Image (tube, rainbow, N blue to C red):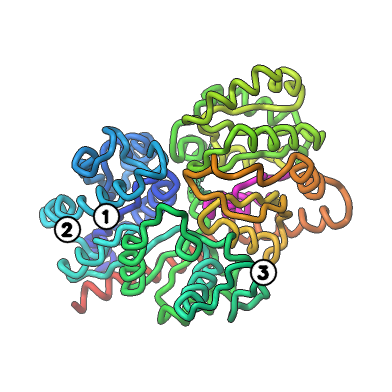
């Protein structure tokens, strides 16, 4: 009982990066922590908070102690257009520096508000990219635990790549093996994340600050589950003195259908019933779902290859057409070529935002064509669906290596090079429609290899569900995290 009352006095402060795909898992963490009886304070800016109001209000109405601290976003002071409060709303790569400057400016405001809250903060769970939370945690003398939305596999790859970089050992061209990993993982420099393969307009000074704050963090929360990548979890724990908590897949903590449907933006496909009906009309495991995440901005020429590749595969498909500045030329191509009309018997286009977790959990889905963002990858894994992998930028090529070479539930479309986020126009077509079709068929066909992949994906999906249940590894990991923070606060 004494222990329980202590838990009620714990106040976990969560500071997500202002990007929808970073806030989504942080809101899931908020709900999971609050379900265990701790108070959660989410720090956000108004326009970001609005996107999550429905989900958070429902959690609060159900009795969870979650509150949102609103910070004013200093768009003007940082030279950003008004309303650009989120990475996915930036008009272009040129604004990236301004965005990180604005993020840095939030520190004073946040600290003032945190001084006033009761109970006082017990720890900060900060997105890796918010470096100032390191100073804030020092001022409040509380642990800063980072969450960066990557897997342990990825963390280890990055750790070893940083060592290679410091020693000038990353070859400019050709394949090389990332050393000291449980599996043989080959990459090329042009497939690496920005820290090792920077786009021309880099933000190295911000990167260095983020890296320093990452190294000094008390511990790390990972959206994964131990059974998925046991060797990598063990190795990463050794690196971090055991302070690694694997609490995922976070997407599976959403049991309510509304919570699943309203993760992130509101779906533009508001005719939920029509979507359900459409999916219900197909045989189990027959539909390909294609979605490239919240940030990617596919050029029209590359979109055409994707659309034609899906069409030529012969399988029913859902294709998400992201909104944004690229949507107009894409819509023009769709209408001029009557693409929607001629594929209407077996194709469904969703404009804007798809209820991804709802779609993936439908039995009709047989393959997920993904850009390999880690949220999407883990959502596919949790749903037990094999994947067609098309990495685009950031650490997505590493995620692809994990899906294809370690987990063996993915087939690559064969992309060879990062298309730096915001610079898509500079690249030619990276993947042809023939390559798309080939990979889709390989995943969807009924041959032995595809069947084995399907079985494996299902088994891993089952493991994922068990991990988050009471007694499961991720459930236990969250208990240990709360205990650790509780003990820290009792003894410091
Ligand atoms: N997402 C969604 N509907 C969309 C696009 C994205 O629900 O139409 C969600 C998806 O479920 C995932 C997140 O947005 O949770 C994307 O995160 P990820 O790490 O996969 O990629 P990013 O957007 O960061 O590139």
Residue furthest to the right in view is 447
Q: Quadrant of the N terminus?
A: bottom left
Secondary structure under tag 2 reads loop
The image quadrant of residue 142 is: bottom left
Q: Up-down: is 162 above or below 121? A: below
Secondary structure under tag 3 reads loop
Secondary structure under tag 1 reads strand
Q: CA distance from mark 3 to mark 1?
A: 48 Å
Of the two numbered discs 3 and 2 in the rendering, the one whose residue sits closer to the viewer: 3
Q: What residue span does the magenta drawing correspond to?
A: 366-385
User: On the image, numbered disc 3 is attached to which residue?
Assistant: 175
Residues at circles 1 and 2 in contact by the CB criterion of under 8 Å? yes
The percent coordinates of residue 135 (x first, y second) are 20, 66
The percent coordinates of residue 365 (x first, y second) are 70, 40
User: On the image, numbered disc 1 is attached to which residue?
Assistant: 39
Q: CA distance from mark 3 to mark 2?
A: 53 Å
* Direction from residue 316 to residue 155 in the image, left or right: left
Towards the viewer: 358 or 380: 380
Residues at circles 3 and 2 in contact by the CB criterion of under 8 Å? no
* Direction from residue 22 to residue 119 in the image, left or right: left
The percent coordinates of residue 252 (x first, y second) are 53, 50
Residue at 28% x, 45% y is 44
Q: Residues within 10 Å of mark 3 (few under 14, many from 20)?
A: some
Q: Is residue 420 magenta?
A: no
Residue at 51% x, 33% y is 353
Q: CA distance from mark 1 to mark 2?
A: 8 Å
The percent coordinates of residue 316 (x first, y second) are 76, 32
Instruction: Please report whichever mark, 3 or 1, sits nearer to the chain's N-terminal start.
Output: 1
Instruction: Please report whichever mark, 3 or 2, sits nearer to the chain's N-terminal start.
Output: 2
Instruction: Please report whichever mark, 1 or 2, sits nearer to the chain's N-terminal start.
Output: 1
Towards the viewer: 63 or 39: 39
User: On the image, numbered disc 2 is attached to which residue?
Assistant: 119
């Amino acid at each position: 009982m004494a222990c329980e009352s202590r838990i009620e006095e714990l106040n976990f402060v969560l500071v997500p990066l202002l990007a929808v795909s970073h806030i989504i898992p942080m809101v899931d963490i908020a709900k999971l922590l609050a379900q265990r009886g701790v108070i959660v304070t989410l720090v956000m800016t108004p326009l970001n908070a609005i996107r999550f109001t429905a989900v958070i209000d429902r959690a609060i109405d159900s009795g969870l102690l979650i509150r949102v601290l609103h910070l004013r976003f200093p768009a003007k002071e940082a030279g950003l257009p008004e309303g650009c409060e989120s990475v996915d709303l930036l008009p272009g790569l040129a604004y990236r520096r301004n965005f990180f400057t604005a993020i840095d400016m939030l520190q004073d405001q946040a600290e003032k508000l945190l001084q006033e809250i009761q109970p006082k903060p017990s720890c900060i769970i900060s997105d890796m990219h918010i470096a100032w939370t390191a100073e804030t945690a020092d001022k409040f003398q509380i642990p800063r635990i980072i969450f960066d939305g990557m897997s342990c596999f990825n963390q280890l790859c990055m750790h070893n790549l940083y060592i290679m970089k410091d020693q000038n050992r990353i070859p400019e061209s050709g394949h090389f093996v990332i050393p000291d990993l449980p599996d043989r993982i080959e990459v090329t420099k042009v497939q690496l994340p920005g820290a090792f393969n920077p786009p021309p307009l880099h933000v190295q000074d911000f990167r260095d600050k983020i890296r320093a704050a990452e190294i000094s963090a008390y511990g790390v929360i990972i959206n994964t589950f131990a059974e998925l990548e046991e060797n990598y979890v063990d190795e990463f724990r050794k690196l971090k003195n055991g302070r690694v908590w694997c609490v995922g897949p976070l997407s599976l903590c959403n049991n309510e259908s509304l919570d699943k449907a309203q993760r992130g933006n509101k779906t533009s496909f508001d005719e939920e019933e029509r979507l359900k009906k459409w999916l219900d009309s197909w045989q189990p495991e027959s539909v390909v779902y294609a979605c490239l995440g919240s940030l990617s901005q596919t050029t029209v020429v590359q979109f055409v290859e994707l659309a034609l590749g899906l069409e030529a595969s012969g399988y029913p498909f859902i294709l998400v057409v992201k909104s944004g500045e690229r949507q107009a030329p894409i819509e023009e191509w769709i209408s001029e070529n009557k693409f929607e009309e001629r594929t209407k018997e077996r194709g469904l286009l969703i404009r804007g935002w798809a209820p991804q977790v709802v779609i993936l959990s439908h039995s009709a889905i047989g393959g997920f064509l993904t850009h390999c963002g880690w949220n999407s990858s883990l959502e596919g894994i949790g749903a037990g669906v094999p994947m067609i992998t098309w990495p685009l930028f950031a650490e997505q090529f590493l995620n692809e290596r994990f899906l294809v070479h370690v987990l063996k539930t993915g087939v690559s479309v064969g992309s060879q090079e990062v298309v730096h986020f915001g610079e898509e126009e500079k690249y030619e077509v990276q993947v042809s429609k023939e390559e798309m079709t080939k990979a889709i068929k390989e995943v969807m066909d009924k041959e032995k290899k595809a069947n084995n992949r399907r079985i494996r994906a299902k088994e891993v999906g089952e493991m994922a569900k068990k991990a988050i249940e009471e007694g499961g590894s991720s459930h236990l990991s969250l208990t240990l995290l709360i205990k650790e923070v509780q003990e820290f606060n009792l003894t410091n």
